[in-house]
Image (cartoon, helix red, strand yellow):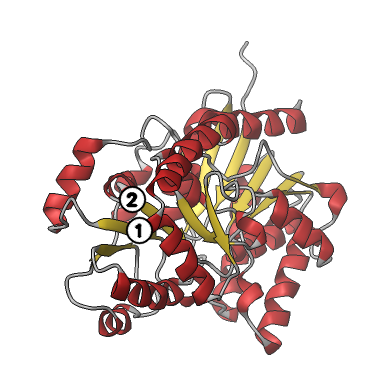
Amino acid sequence: MPTEKKSICFIVSSALTARVFLRNHINNLSSTYSVHLVGNFSESDKTELDKLLLEDYKCIAIVRQISLWHDIRSVVELYRYFRKHKFDIVHSVTPKAGLITALAAKLASIRYRIHIFTGQVWLTRNGIMRSILRGCDKLINCLSTHLLVDSVGQLNFLITEKIISPSKSSVLGNGSINGVDINRFLPDSLSRSNVRKELKIDEKRLVFLFLGRLNRDKGIMDLVKAFKCVQNDYPYIFLLIVGIDEEDLRGEIIQQLPQHTYAFIAETTQPQLYYQAADIFCLPSYREGFGTSVIEASACGLPVICSNIYGLESTIIENETGLKHTAGDVIALQDCMIKMITDPQFRIGAGENGRKYTAHFFQDRIVMDAWKKFYDQLVV
């Protein structure tokens, strides 16, 4: 008689989180676990969710914004779902999902309650909101049985800040929540040519790429200011901006940049195409848990310019796969950009080194195996 599979339930705020960060884990775990998914899903999300190897999925309105009434209702609904299914493991991703899950799972007496930290919202906040958000992360720590962190730098920061308990916290593998598929993210000259033709970017242009959510915490406005200054002396450079505009920044960006020096892509399910079309990747962020976009860019052979914050410290090797600058220092960012422009030997070599580094440490298979081993050790 076959042994009944142990059950895992992932809890997210949106289908995007599941699609981007959990797809490989869900499909990899499904052969030995009964995998379930909970999140704030719309009707249009169901087509993508049906492609995942899930036992089932449940829509519960876990919203990103703080809303006492909605949050209490989400805790109650999730508690009932947990009581009904009696999962062996529940695992939350993103801060709001983490708090709702920690409360509901504790009330439902779930044995293994896991949350993964992928960045701190409160890091760039001030006043009472900073205190509230820090308190939420501390509460997640108190109510969870195990905590994962997606980079060593972030782990050390959270321990120093007394947010998490060292005894229940760990980084799996070399970090990253999902790693990178180096057979998908790779240099491709044909893709480069096709995307540039589509966007009307001349082959002689040197393209700086930003790929991520458009908000001030990501440093996009610092990049725009730096690019504008550098472009005065190097008029053949180009800025490609890819990502959802969360803070209505597009109009402000357009006002600052000269015409025909930039292009916007609002959203994409094929980010590799834009890495392949670019020459240098930039992430001047103020806060990151790990920096998945950095290892994706490196896998595509791009040299990287990024801020020297704790979440990005393991994603590049300074002066070997890219350059770092102090977060918020626009002049230092300009210097990094000029180095990339004026030293093609360094630029090309850093891109080649970045692909080797990423392939060795952050392949998706490495991360998936580490996650499965972690669960197997819990429920053995």
- Which residue is rendered at x = 34% and y = 48% of the image? 275
Q: Position of residue 372 (x, y in %)?
A: 63, 30
Q: Position of residue 262 (x, y in %)?
A: 24, 68
Report the Cα–Cα distance between label 2 and label 1: 8 Å
Answer left or right for 189 relative to 334. left
Residue 153 or 260: which is nearer the viewer?
260
Label 2: few (<14), some (14–19) or many (≥20) C-alpha neighbours in 10 Å: many
Amino acid type of disc 2? Asp
Amino acid type of disc 1? Leu
Tell me the number on the disc at residue 279.
2
Tell me if residue 51 comes above or below residue 141 in the rendering.
above
Q: Which residue is mark 1?
A: 209
Answer left or right for 341 relative to 65. left
Tell me if residue 246 comes above or below residue 307 in the rendering.
below
Q: Position of residue 52 (x, y in %)?
A: 40, 37
- Which residue is rendered at x = 63% and y = 35% of the image? 371
Are circles 2 and 1 on residues that touch, CB within 8 Å?
yes
Residue 212 or 333: which is nearer the viewer?
333
Disc 2 is placed on an element classified as loop
Q: How many marks?
A: 2
Residue 56 or 15: which is nearer the viewer?
15
Label 1: few (<14), some (14–19) or many (≥20) C-alpha neighbours in 10 Å: many
Mark 2 or mark 1: name the one nearer the start of the chain: 1
Residue 159 or 330: which is nearer the viewer?
330
